[in-house]
Amino acid sequence: MKIAVLKEGAAGESRVAATPETVKKFVALGAQVAVEAGAGAGASYADGDYAAAGASVGDRVATLAGAGIVLGVQGPDPATLGGAAPGAWIVAGLNPFGAGENGGRARVDAYAAAGYEALAMEFMPRITRAQSMDILSSQSNLAGYKAVLDAAGVYGRAFPMMMTAAGTVSAAKVFVMGVGVAGLQAIATARRLGAQVSATDVRSATKEQILSLGAKPIFVENVAGIEGEGSGGYATEMSEEYQKAQAELVSAHIAKQDIVITTALIPGRPAPRLISDAQLATMRPGSVIVDLAVESGGNVEGAVAGEIVERHGVKIVGHRNVAGRLPADASALFARNLYNFLSTFWDKDAGKPVLDDEIGDAVRLTRDGAVVNPRLLS
């Protein structure tokens, strides 16, 4: 089985889907690995390191020739995959619900029309045995960390309380909205930097997690009809009554905050609006908001993907691909996710991976020329 590792084509994408470490492991399984020249440059992995790990390094044509598995961070353009074997697996983050040139239903349909078997790694089920394959968790962890650093970079003050001969510097107040993987890491990072941290989520089960990290939970109490707990640990949409109560609570709280980090996402739907323009106007000038959901529509009114904008004296940070702004670590974790996925199902006799139904049916988008994933057919 030949595994091809491509250079990413999306603008600003510095990550790579395999590292010399995972290439060496794939070779040990008996796979042949080909890496497109320059694929790892953005993440500081040299072509020579891939060659030393056992991969062949060449141009895109040579890399794809006869490949049965194509690895990517973001799904490659189907038109650029000429030479791959019929029925080749495309294993990447395929963004099937997204829009634009690097995702969306049109690209999924194109994979089907070309006869490829597209496997969306972000559809990995959140079950115990798949934790090591979960790209959303590994990348969100880094995004939560980087969000705090991004906030610190544009915030005009220090994070920790400082006692000096000239007087005391008060600790920054940081509020994290959405306590999934990214939110938990944001809490932990802000705490390490010395901030006073509070957090909220629609899922009541996160209250203990917030407390365990030394932060203050901010929750709506005694409101019926909360629908925050979704399948697989994801949040779902809230009831109208809860939304109203939460808006009132958040309005009062964010007016006192220096930094707000929003992380709320609902799979397959636009990001929920958490902060309105009116709420922004209550914040102190010089405050900072980092919107980690900006590429999915944004949690913050006025956030712009790829830009830092200012409204009412508040800076709204809307960086794209936040995990990818730490390309070396993000690539290392992403590559291990892919290796863990493929190696778990590697059949030595067949010389290739053979997926089981539970995980295979969850991640498989296309097969035999058709779109087959139930989430795309409903």
Image (cartoon, rainbow, N blue to C red):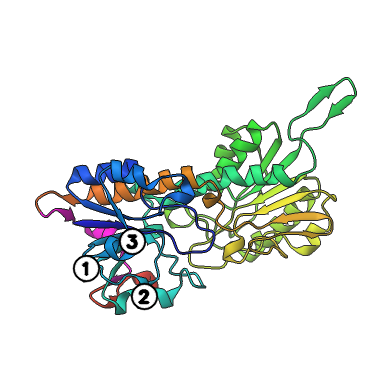
Q: Residue at x 83, y 30 (%)?
A: 169
The image shows residue 224 at horizontal and vertical percentages of 61, 57
Instruction: Name which of mark 1 and mark 3 comes first in the sequence.
Output: 3
Residue 180 located left or right of residue 2 = right
Q: Amino acid at mark 2?
A: Ala
Image quadrant containing the C terminus: bottom left
Of residues 67 and 320, the one drawn nearer to the viewer in this rendering = 67
Name the residue that disc number 1 marks. 85
Q: Residue at x 64, y 43 (%)?
A: 148
CA gap between label 2 and label 1 equals: 14 Å
Name the residue that disc number 2 marks. 79
Name the residue that disc number 3 marks. 59
CA gap between label 3 and label 2 equals: 16 Å
Mark 3: secondary structure:
loop
Image quadrant containing the N terminus: bottom left
Label 2–label 1 contact, CB within 8 A: no
The disc placed on residue 48 is none
Instruction: Name which of mark 3 and mark 2 comes first in the sequence.
Output: 3
> Is label 3 or label 2 in front?
3
